[in-house]
Image: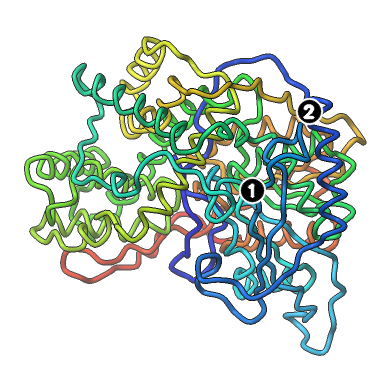
């Protein structure tokens, strides 16, 4: 699953990607990067430092909503680091220079601290929009001290784009989404997964194997050099935290500061198949949180005063949509996709609850607006899915016997039906992947090998379950974990929680970390609004106060 970078209702940029946190992997033995790749990286780094980046105006394809301060360029990296003199691909890069303006004192000039490079996750998400975050109030202090630098990773957008199928075939609608699929449905999805894997090889060619996380980490080091930075200041979200952890393990002396927001589990035994199952279990818990919230606002949404009644309302909508698609395009599959996003971001709770309520009370229009596929985004979405699939399939061994997938997901779906099978179908092409699989790197750093790293995590994050942040903290010696308690939004840095942002600012601006692991109270719950009568109600008894 993937999530895209999104704007919250308050206008703050949520710096994560919407699929997904990583989705599973079979155990493998630790694999150290090869010496040929290390030598190739050194060659590429020297070349990039000498060439730099020629920044100029951004095209609409790179940053559609640009400003005069945001400039774009490209950096060349080897397709295969073992052969740095071979085929080169160009990564697109965006940058907004440090404003050096103190947001609290217009007369004070802030010293520039270099470049802050950002990866939003996926894999398959583009970070080209990142420099725009400097206009958001919570980020102005960081934007004063740092050049904000985003980029499109290899395979994404104009960075040697990958493709696995005709984008016109991506948004078939309406579709079904059975929580407990029949044997016939399973055979249909196996056929589709095999065809998708073949399409990746046919459309992407022999270079498909080089789209993997280790090469993404090497690309980071080339980007660092091209930006003329001796050490990297990096922030990664979701999958970007795994990328950051790999970089920290491969190039520990090249790290200046690093923030890992919504950390995924770097244990090589989880990359990526086991993480897939853990993620599906966590989404069930987050779906329960959402149903509980809707039930507490039954006066607004009229979907039931208990979570069980809300579940029945949702199931009723699925059944009706299976019989007749809303607007001809919204079936159970589109409903599921829309509500999955509420598992990532609780800012989405009011709009989803309101659309479900309106549909069940006779007005399908809000649900159609929310859930119908958008053909104009098909090319970008197909590209993102292709990169997601290629990177995760290439990264690690996956079970190749369908019986293993069927056994594990059937068992899990008995207790976690909300997302289990949809998550499995998303990743099933990896069972039939045509390119060689790698063994995951055993990410570990010893005391003093790496500057202190800051890890951010929400306790009830479904896309990146909290145990992943704990494991990341154990593996990176000297790292510090900042936890947003009893909260589940995916990506918490630079959001509405002042406690989290205080720790983020102190670290990036001053290099100051909490003496021990820090704990922040949760952000306020969403405001219930937009019920079937079109009127919202603000409850005084909302749980949780902003820190």
What is the total number of numbered labels drawn onto the structure image? 2
Circle 1 Cα neighbour tier, 10 Å, few/some/many (<14 / 14–19 / ≥20): many
Q: Identify the coloring.
A: rainbow
Q: Determine which quarter of the picture holds residue 468.
A: top right
Circle 2 Cα neighbour tier, 10 Å, few/some/many (<14 / 14–19 / ≥20): some
Split into 4 quadrants, where in the image is the N terminus? Answer: top left
Split into 4 quadrants, where in the image is the C terminus? Answer: bottom right
| First-in-chain label (1 vs 2) | 1
Where residue 326 appears, as percent x and y from the top left, is 13, 53
Of helix, strand and loop, which one carries label 2?
A: loop
- Disc 1 to disc 2, how far (Cα)? 18 Å
Is residue 424 placed above or below 529 in the rendered structure? above
Is residue 68 placed above or below 416 in the rendered structure? below
Q: Which mark is residue 374?
A: none
Extreme-front residue of the structure: 86
Residue wearing tag 2:
444
Where residue 160 appears, as percent x and y from the top left, is 57, 49
Q: Is residue 299 visible?
A: no
Q: Residue at x 35, y 27 (%)?
A: 193
Q: Residue at x 39, y 53 (%)?
A: 379
Q: Is residue 151 left or right of residue 287?
A: right
Of helix, strand and loop, which one carries label 1?
A: strand
Q: Are marks 1 and 2 in contact (CB under 8 Å)?
A: no
Q: Residue at x 24, y 47 (%)?
A: 335
Q: Is residue 121 left or right of residue 37?
A: left
Residue wearing tag 1:
261
Where residue 5 appears, as percent x and y from the top left, is 51, 57
Q: Residue at x 56, y 18 (%)?
A: 397
* Front-lying residue, 415 or 252: 252
Where residue 333 appears, as percent x and y from the top left, is 24, 41
Q: Determine which quarter of the picture holds residue 449.
A: top right
Is residue 94 placed above or below 140 in the rendered structure? above
């Amino acid at each position: 699953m993937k999530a895209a970078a999104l704007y919250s209702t308050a206008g703050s940029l949520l710096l994560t990607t919407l699929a997904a946190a990583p989705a599973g992997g079979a155990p493998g033995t630790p694999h150290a990067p090869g010496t040929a790749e290390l030598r190739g990286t050194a060659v590429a780094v020297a070349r990039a430092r000498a060439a730099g980046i020629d920044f100029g105006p951004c095209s609409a394809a790179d940053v559609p909503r640009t400003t005069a301060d945001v400039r774009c360029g490209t950096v060349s990296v080897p397709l295969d680091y073992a052969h740095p003199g071979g085929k080169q691909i160009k990564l697109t890069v965006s940058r907004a220079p440090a404003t050096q303006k103190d947001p609290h004192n217009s007369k004070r000039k802030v010293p520039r601290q270099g470049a802050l490079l950002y990866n939003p996750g996926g894999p398959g998400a583009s970070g080209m929009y990142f420099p725009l975050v400097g206009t958001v109030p919570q980020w102005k202090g960081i934007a004063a001290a740092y050049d904000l630098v985003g980029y499109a990773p290899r395979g994404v957008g104009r960075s040697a784009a990958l493709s696995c199928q005709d984008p016109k075939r991506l948004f078939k609608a309406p579709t079904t989404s059975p929580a407990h699929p029949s044997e016939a449905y399973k055979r249909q999805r196996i056929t589709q997964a095999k065809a998708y894997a073949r399409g990746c090889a046919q459309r992407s060619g022999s270079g498909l194997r080089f789209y993997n996380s280790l090469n993404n980490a090497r690309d980071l080091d080339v980007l660092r050099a091209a930006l003329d930075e001796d050490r990297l200041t990096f922030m990664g979200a979701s999958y970007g935290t795994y990328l950051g952890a790999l970089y920290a393990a491969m190039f520990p002396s090249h790290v200046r500061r690093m923030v890992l927001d919504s950390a995924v589990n770097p244990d090589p035994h989880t990359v990526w198949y086991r993480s897939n199952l853990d993620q599906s279990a966590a989404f069930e818990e987050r779906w329960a949180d959402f149903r509980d919230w809707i039930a507490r606002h039954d006066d607004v949404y009229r979907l039931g005063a208990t979570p069980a009644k809300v579940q029945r309302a949702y199931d009723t909508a699925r059944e009706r949509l299976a019989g007749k698609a809303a607007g001809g395009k919204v079936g159970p599959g589109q409903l599921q996709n829309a509500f999955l996003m509420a598992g990532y971001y609780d800012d989405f709770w009011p709009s989803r609850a309101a659309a479900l309520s309106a549909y069940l009370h006779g007005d399908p229009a809000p649900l159609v607006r929310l859930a119908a596929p958008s053909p104009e985004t098909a090319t970008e979405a197909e590209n993102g899915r292709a990169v997601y699939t290629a990177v995760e399939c290439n990264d690690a061994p996956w079970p190749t016997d369908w019986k293993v997938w069927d056994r594990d997901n059937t068992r899990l779906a008995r207790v976690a039906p909300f997302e289990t099978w949809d998550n499995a179908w998303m990743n099933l092409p990896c069972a039939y992947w045509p390119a060689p699989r790698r063994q995951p790197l055993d990410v570990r750093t010893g005391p003093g090998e790496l500057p202190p790293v800051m890890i951010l995590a929400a306790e009830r994050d479904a896309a990146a379950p909290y145990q992943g942040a704990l494991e990341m903290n154990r593996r990176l010696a000297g790292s510090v974990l900042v936890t947003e308690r009893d909260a589940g939004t995916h990506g918490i840095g630079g959001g509405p929680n002042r406690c989290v942002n205080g720790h983020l600012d102190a670290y990036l601006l001053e290099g100051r970390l909490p003496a021990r692991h820090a704990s922040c109270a949760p952000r306020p719950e969403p405001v219930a609004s937009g019920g079937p009568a079109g009127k919202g109600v603000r409850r005084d008894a909302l749980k949780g106060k902003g820190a």
